Image (tube, rainbow, N blue to C red):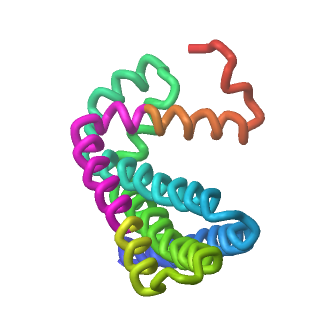
Amino acid sequence: MKKDKSDRGWLIIIVITTFMISGTVSLISESTLSQVNVVVALIILFVIILLGVIFDIIGTAVTAGDETPFHAMAAKKIKGAKVVVKLIRNASKVSNFCNDVVGDVAGIISGSVGVVIVAKILETNRGLNQILVSALVSAIIAAMTVGGKAMGKKFAISKSNDILFKVAKVIYFFQEIFKGKNPFKNTK
């Protein structure tokens, strides 16, 4: 019964988080894209796809990671080691957030950005076929997303602990800042 409540709580949190992230990112990208040229819009699109791929790598790495070496590191008080253990112990939630929330939101937003790019291309090149331009932009977005994630998964599985340790160091850095501590301070 307690597990069901915990799962329902996680579901509610993830739905609200997804709504907030997608709404915010969509609002920012839509308002920004209306004021930029096609090249800048393509760069924004690339960044969104790259963000989705990076989070997919993290989500895959956390499911393939091994917490054993991080226990020894945590005992030696190596910064970020405890964070890795916590990430791996919560792999299903971390993976869900990284792969599904961020990854899927990036996919949806990249589609929206693609529509804006198509409109901008057709606006400046009125003689182009709208259907062909739309199909080409969609195909490029899909190829970049799927290809990036495919390469990322192989990398994530083979280097899972290295990836997780780097992610943990970033998380640790921000945790220290939010606690009001200096993350650059040289302590063991």
**In this rendering, is residue 70 above or below 65?**
above
Left or right: where 28 falls relative to 97: right
Residue 58 on image: x %, y %:
39, 48
Q: For the N terminus, which image quadrant?
A: bottom left
Regarding residue 31, the answer to whether it shows in the image is yes
Q: Which span of residues is magenta-colored?
A: 142-165
Residue 159: say if magenta: yes
Relative depth, front residue between 53 and 140: 140
Residue 24: say if magenta: no
Relative depth, front residue between 104 and 67: 104
Residue 50 on image: x %, y %:
46, 52
Relative depth, front residue between 91 and 122: 122
**In this rendering, is residue 141 above or below 40?**
below
Report the residue at 64% width, 74% height from top: 124
How many numbered marks have been drawn onto this rendered protein structure? Answer: 0
Report the residue at 43% width, 17% height from top: 76
Q: Quadrant of residue 107?
A: bottom left
Residue 75 on image: x %, y %:
41, 22
Residue 43 on image: x %, y %:
57, 55
Report the residue at 42% width, 44% height from top: 86
| Residue that protrudes farthest toward the front in the picture | 127
Predominant secondary structure in magenta?
A: helix
Left or right: where 72 falls relative to 8: left
Left or right: where 88 falls relative to 31: left
Q: Quadrant of residue 27?
A: bottom right
**In this rendering, is residue 123 above or below 60?**
below
Q: For the C terminus, which image quadrant?
A: top right
**In this rendering, is residue 118 above or below 94?**
below
Report the residue at 52% width, 25% height from top: 79
Regarding residue 9, the answer to whether it shows in the image is no
